[in-house]
Image: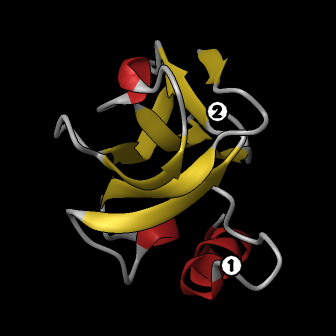
Amino acid sequence: MDVNTGSSSSNGIVRIDYKGEGITAGYGQDDIGFVYGPVWYSNTEETRVFATFGQEEDFFLSGHWKNRESARGQAVIVTEKEAAVTLIGLEAGFRNHTDYLFRLLSNTVFNE
């Protein structure tokens, strides 16, 4: 698996396609997420992908993130198939800005 990053000053609201089960229970297709120093994953054959950035050209809804095109449609929440490791490329616990995403953290703790 490859870990890809945007600049550390990039942040904003993005469209996320959540699988809606396990770690992402309670979230759905064409939902939202928040990134700050965005991270996404490619070459994910050895992982289970639970969420991806939206496929739409306008998956980035608001904020500041230059050169974001390579993240479109890429995995943003993955778990290792052979180990209890979960990687979340969103800012699920950033201050209190992302209270909508806090469930991702608790789902991860109680599902893995």
Q: Position of residue 31 (x, y in %)?
A: 29, 68
Left or right for 88, reference 49: right
Local packing at callout 1 (Cα closer than 10 Å; few below 14, some 14-19, many 20+) is: few
Against 22, residue 2 (above or below) is: above
Residue 70 found in image quarter: top left
Label 2 sits on residue = 82
Q: Which amino acid is tagged 1? A: Phe
Tell me which residue sits at (64%, 87%) in the image. Answer: 99
Tell me which residue sits at (37%, 84%) in the image. Answer: 26
Q: Which amino acid is tagged 2? A: Glu
Q: CA distance from mark 2 to mark 1?
A: 18 Å
Q: Position of residue 80 (x, y in %)?
A: 62, 35
Tell me which residue sits at (32%, 56%) in the image. Answer: 15
Residue 107 found in image quarter: bottom right
Local packing at callout 2 (Cα closer than 10 Å; few below 14, some 14-19, many 20+) is: few
Label 1 sits on residue = 110
Q: How many numbered circles does the render carry?
A: 2
Q: Position of residue 78 (x, y in %)?
A: 54, 42
